[in-house]
Image: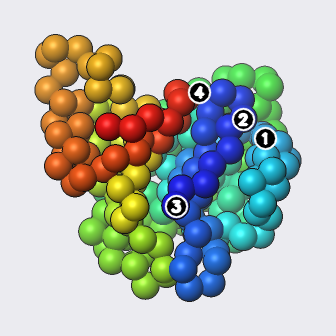
Amino acid sequence: MVEYFRYHNTNCFFLESSIDKGLLAIDAGWPCTLYEYQRALKTIGYSFKNIKWAIVTHFHMDHAGLVGEFIKEGITCYAFENQTFKDMDEMERTILKNKEYSAYQKIDRNRLKTTSISDFNNEIKTLGINGEAIITKGHSTDSITFLTNDYEAIIGDLAPINQIMENDIVSKENWNEIKHRGMKRVYPSHAEIFNI
């Protein structure tokens, strides 16, 4: 079952391991907001120490802004084959242009666990996380969606079905895959949860 909190108009999601109660965080908040993130996590009954692993739906600052701090705190953070250092560089350039984020913790690429989606999906089964990541490039080329075994889809910024432009073939294909996999409940990053 997906747990989540909302802060700065962004949802952050969590799945609990059936083995050791460790958390997989899906999306890693805004830059320089670690204390806010930690306080918000407490409101849903978890401690930041519960987070063992993290993935992001894509490398934009409102989804991956704390990855550098997560890595520094010992959390295993993953990046997939469609999530390149170029994507991270673009995000970090945007962050560092803003004086508000002068204390930003850059991502230590040497400690980031780069892996294929397939290898990640096999690994998380051994960690007690029930679900799988799929590549969904409708929003950006580095976007992924996480599908749980409870038929929940964490979609990041993939446009809702009723808002897709007629010529947006990629987003339509993404939604066809999500529906084909039998997903029932959808968790977007900035909108309300909805059923399909």
| Residue density around tag 1, few if under 14, some if 14–19, many if 20 or more, within 10 Å | some
Choose top left, top right, bottom left or bottom right for residue 181. bottom left
Which color scheme did the rendering employ for the protein? rainbow
Circle 1 SS class: loop
Label 3 vs label 1, nearer the camera = 3
Type of amino acid at the residue the image marks with label 1: Thr
Do callouts 1 and 2 mark residues in contact (Cβ within 8 Å)? yes
Tell me which numbered mark, 1 or 4, is placed earlier along the sequence.
1
User: Which residue in the protein does label 4 denote?
Assistant: 94
Do callouts 3 and 1 mark residues in contact (Cβ within 8 Å)? no
Label 2 vs label 4, nearer the camera = 2
Q: Is residue 140 visible?
A: no
Residue 52 horizontal/vertical position (percent): 63, 71
Type of amino acid at the residue the image marks with label 2: Tyr
User: Which residue in the protein does label 3 denote?
Assistant: 1
User: Which residue in the protein does label 2 denote?
Assistant: 7
Residue 40 horizontal/vertical position (percent): 79, 46
Locate residue 19 relative to residue 8 in the image: left or right: left
User: In the rendered image of this protein, does residue 112 appear above or below residue 26?
Assistant: below
**How far, Cα to Cα, is label 2 from label 4?**
20 Å
Question: Given the current orientation, which residue lies at the most extreme top position?
Answer: 166
70 or 168, which is in the foreground?
168
Circle 4 SS class: helix
Label 3 vs label 2, nearer the camera = 3
Circle 2 SS class: strand
User: Which residue in the protein does label 1 denote?
Assistant: 33
Do callouts 2 and 4 mark residues in contact (Cβ within 8 Å)? no
Residue at 34 percent across and 47 percent down: it is 184
10 or 139, which is in the foreground?
10
Residue 186 horizontal/vertical position (percent): 41, 41
